[in-house]
Amino acid sequence: MVELRGERQTLTSELAQVRAMARELEAKMDPDKAAARELCRALSSSVDRKGMAKVRRQVRVTSVQDMVSLDDGLSWRKYGQKDILGAKYPRAYFRCTHRHTQGCNATKQVQRTDGDPLLFDVVYLGEHICGQAAAAAQRAPPLAGAEPVPMQPQHAGQEQSSPPAVETEGITHQVVEDPMAPFLFTSTQDVVDGYFSFISPANSDCQFSSDFSAGSAGVDMDHEARFDDLFLITSEFFQPEIQNL
DNA sequence: TTGATTTGACCGGA
DNA sequence: TCCGGTCAAATCAA
């Protein structure tokens, strides 16, 4: 137990170190090198423990009573509701029904938008590792070329797999996605509130590209050593994940 | 009786 | 200190 705590502290401090280095690097980066700065930001957020898989979508219902439309085919259990500052309607918190039986940590947040009472903001967090995720994926397999995203709520039940905005029976699902898909070590990201959210290392969806070079990312060469440092530490941290791939 | 929902309390991060 | 997220006891519904 003490040992575990020690390891956890080490991991935490190493993560903090990587994050700090990424930020420092970003600060020193030439403002023109947007790609490199984005990379630093991505690196910083990817090691952030809060950086879970996050998918945001908007769901329109046909009437105020039409809450069935919010059903995504997966079984959720409501565990809380909260009034949000500045928001007209409370936010509801759901987690996977199989959280305890199968250790599924997927959660979602549903909030009615202020402007349109028929429009709901639905934010999916985490990855479904329970059986129903596979069943849902079978019902609606991913499109060709679709990424092997751990959390794919659009695979579920009545919800559509694509395109980003699909309307069925009065339901509009708008999956907010970023067209840039810029970085090497993540296959999926969504624009959430104006920033990229990345699949965390814990989702095993993270891999480094060995042919990455500072030059190709538009990074000044005098930052190369810093990058080397950063990647050395990060690679060490992700090593078990990489081996599991 | 069992599983889901409600709601006030609690906790941690900024 | 405030606010968002989660917990857990009480309550409800099938």
Image (tube, coloured by chain):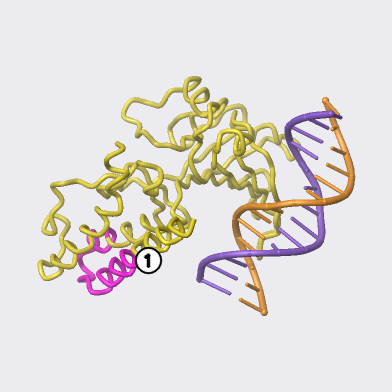
Chain colours: A yellow, B purple, C orange
Which residue shows up at 55% across the image and 27% down it? A132
In terms of depth relative to the viewer, which is nearer, A192 or B13? B13
**A169 with respect to A162 (left or right):** right
Q: Nearer the viewer, residue A108 or A160?
A: A108
Give the class, few, some or many, for how many residues have Cα within 10 Å of label 1's Cα (few <14, many ≥20). few
Q: Is residue A9 left or right of residue A238?
A: right
The answer to whether A45 appears left or right of A87 in the picture is left
Q: Position of residue A203 (x, y in %)?
A: 40, 43
Q: Which residue is mark 1?
A: A13
Q: As rendered, which of A173 and A233 lies closer to the eye?
A: A233
Q: Residue A85's spot in the image, x, y percent? A: 66, 65
- Magenta-highlighted residues: A17-39
Say what secondary structure mark 1 lies in. Answer: helix
Q: Is residue A41 magenta?
A: no
Establish if A146 lies above or below C8.
Answer: above
Most foreground residue, A189 or A131: A131
Residue A229 position, x and y percent, is: 19, 64
The percent coordinates of residue A69 (x first, y second) are 65, 33
Residue A24 belongs to the span the image colors magenta: yes
Count of numbered marks: 1
Task: Please tell me which residue is depicted at 32% across the width and 44% down the height of the picture.
Answer: A241
**Is residue A92 shown above or below A144?**
below
**Three-letter code, disc 1:** Ser
Q: Check the image and report above or below for A208 versus A49.
A: above
Which secondary structure type mostly characterizes the magenta part of the structure? helix
Residue lying at the far front of the rendered structure: A2
